[in-house]
Image (cartoon, grey):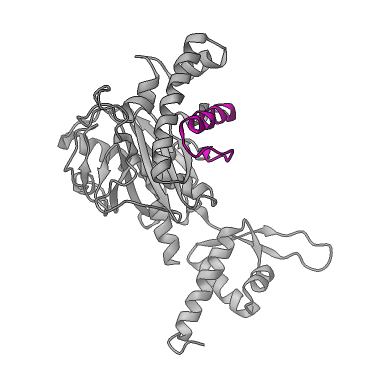
């Protein structure tokens, strides 16, 4: 045994191991915990009592048994702590709460047009505070509030370093935190979506995540971590130049991937994704032509990115619920038609994130931090 490890360290390790084992399983008995962790029943019992006292776990019925007494089942208390995610868009604000399992259990959507004014920041803050009050939770249960924005943020989440969509470059988190008595952090919306993707699947490793919504966003995931880069803008493939003579991008340049591969590039004015895909799936020739052109541009961009970073791709964002495997097969074919290194491997996948992946992803980091402290 390492002489630097104290009895207190061992106790903390047992406490943590027991909680996380229960967390990873829906329900466990005392004996199952002891067997899996190779601990004595008195040690397990002592730690279960501590965890119950802190309201982190609870008894959850009993297991079936054909002989003897039925064993008590233990499960975590999902709402022992909660986290709040806020997605800020040009004309709307979405506020939701997640539990320790990352499951959203309450949501509120508001029509509030974004403005760089104290009045706006106070109105949104008051809406968040009112939302939290409606949850009937104690203040200490709320871990923090993550604000997902269509902008790049500093690595500590305290300020916005590049925000041309909302015209919010330089904004400090204090505009919200001064009105809210909880930790507050800014997060880039595309990286929030990627965070949710990481949360719901454990087979990612290294991947390029493309969030295809009204605007395009990207995130680079390395070793199951979102890689921010030196200045926080790694993965922002949306501003990769596809055609220097193309349409203007909101960043001020021309022909960015954003202008070819975002939902705004696909749809006509006042057209919805739902309507577009209804027409497409019904066989409307003009919509099939537009979709083929869109996939061609997407394949061109994916091929260029893949030549630099030879990794898997996940397509998420607003478009992902409408995608079918036949679209992905078609996209693979288009990429392989363009690349000098064609093969039959499938490396493009549809997102598995739940609805509201962006605000959920803004809330998840607080849950992750809390779980790491147990």
294 left or right, relative to 112: right
- Using the rendered image of the protein, determine whether residue 20 is visible from the camera's viewpoint: yes
- Using the rendered image of the protein, determine whether residue 135 is visible from the camera's viewpoint: no
Q: Residue furthest front?
A: 340
Image quadrant in which you'd find residue 223 = bottom left
253 left or right, relative to 275: left
Number of marks in picture: 0
Task: Return the residue nearer the eye: 70 or 14.
Answer: 14
User: x, y percentage for residue 128?
Assistant: 32, 41
Task: Return the residue nearer the eye: 54 or 368.
Answer: 368
Residue under the point 19% across and 37% down = 168
Residue under the point 50% across and 79% down = 11
Q: Residue furthest top?
A: 285
Q: Residue furthest right?
A: 66
User: x, y percentage for residue 192?
Assistant: 38, 44
10 left or right, relative to 94: right
Image quadrant in which you'd find residue 346 = top right
Image quadrant in which you'd find residue 147 = top left
Above or below for 108 versus 70: above
Above or below for 238 versus 21: above
Above or below for 142 versus 130: below
Magenta region includes residue 152: no
For the C terminus, give its image quadrant: bottom left
Magenta region includes residue 330: yes
User: x, y percentage for residue 362?
Assistant: 37, 45
Q: Which residues are magenta?
A: 325-349
User: x, y percentage for residue 60?
Assistant: 63, 58
């Amino acid at each position: 045994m390492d002489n630097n490890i104290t009895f207190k360290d061992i106790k903390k390790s047992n406490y943590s191991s027991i909680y996380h084992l229960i967390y990873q399983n829906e329900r466990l008995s005392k004996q199952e915990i002891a067997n899996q962790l190779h601990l004595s029943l008195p040690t397990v019992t002592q730690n279960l009592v501590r965890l119950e006292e802190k309201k982190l776990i609870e008894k959850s019925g009993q297991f079936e048994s054909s002989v003897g007494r039925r064993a008590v089942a233990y499960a975590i208390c999902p709402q022992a702590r909660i986290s709040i995610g806020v997605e800020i868009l040009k004309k709307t604000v979405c506020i939701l709460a997640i539990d320790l399992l990352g499951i959203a259990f309450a949501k509120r959507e508001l029509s509030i047009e974004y403005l760089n004014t104290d009045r706006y920041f106070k109105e949104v803050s008051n809406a968040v505070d009112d939302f939290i009050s409606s949850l009937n939770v104690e203040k200490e249960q709320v871990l923090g509030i993550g604000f997902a924005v269509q902008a790049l943020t500093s690595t500590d989440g305290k300020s916005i370093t590049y925000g041309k969509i909302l015209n919010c470059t330089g904004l400090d988190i204090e505009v919200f935190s001064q009105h809210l008595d909880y930790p507050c952090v800014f997060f880039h919306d595309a990286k929030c979506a990627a965070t949710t993707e990481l949360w719901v699947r454990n087979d990612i490793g290294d991947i390029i995540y493309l969030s295809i919504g009204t605007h395009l966003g990207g995130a680079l995931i390395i070793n199951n971590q979102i890689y921010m880069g030196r200045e926080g803008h790694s993965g922002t493939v949306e501003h990769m130049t596809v055609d220097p003579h193309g349409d203007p991008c909101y960043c001020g340049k021309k022909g960015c991937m954003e202008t070819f591969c975002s939902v705004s590039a696909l749809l006509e004015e006042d057209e919805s994704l739902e309507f577009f895909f209804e027409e497409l799936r019904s066989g409307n020739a003009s919509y099939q032509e537009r979709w083929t052109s869109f996939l061609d541009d997407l394949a061109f961009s994916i091929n260029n990115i893949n030549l630099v970073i030879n990794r898997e791709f996940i397509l998420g964002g607003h478009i992902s619920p409408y995608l079918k495997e036949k679209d992905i097969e078609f996209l693979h074919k288009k990429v392989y038609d363009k690349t000098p290194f064609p093969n039959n491997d499938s490396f493009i996948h549809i997102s598995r994130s739940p609805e509201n992946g962006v605000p959920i992803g803004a809330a998840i980091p607080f849950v992750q931090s809390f779980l790491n402290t147990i």
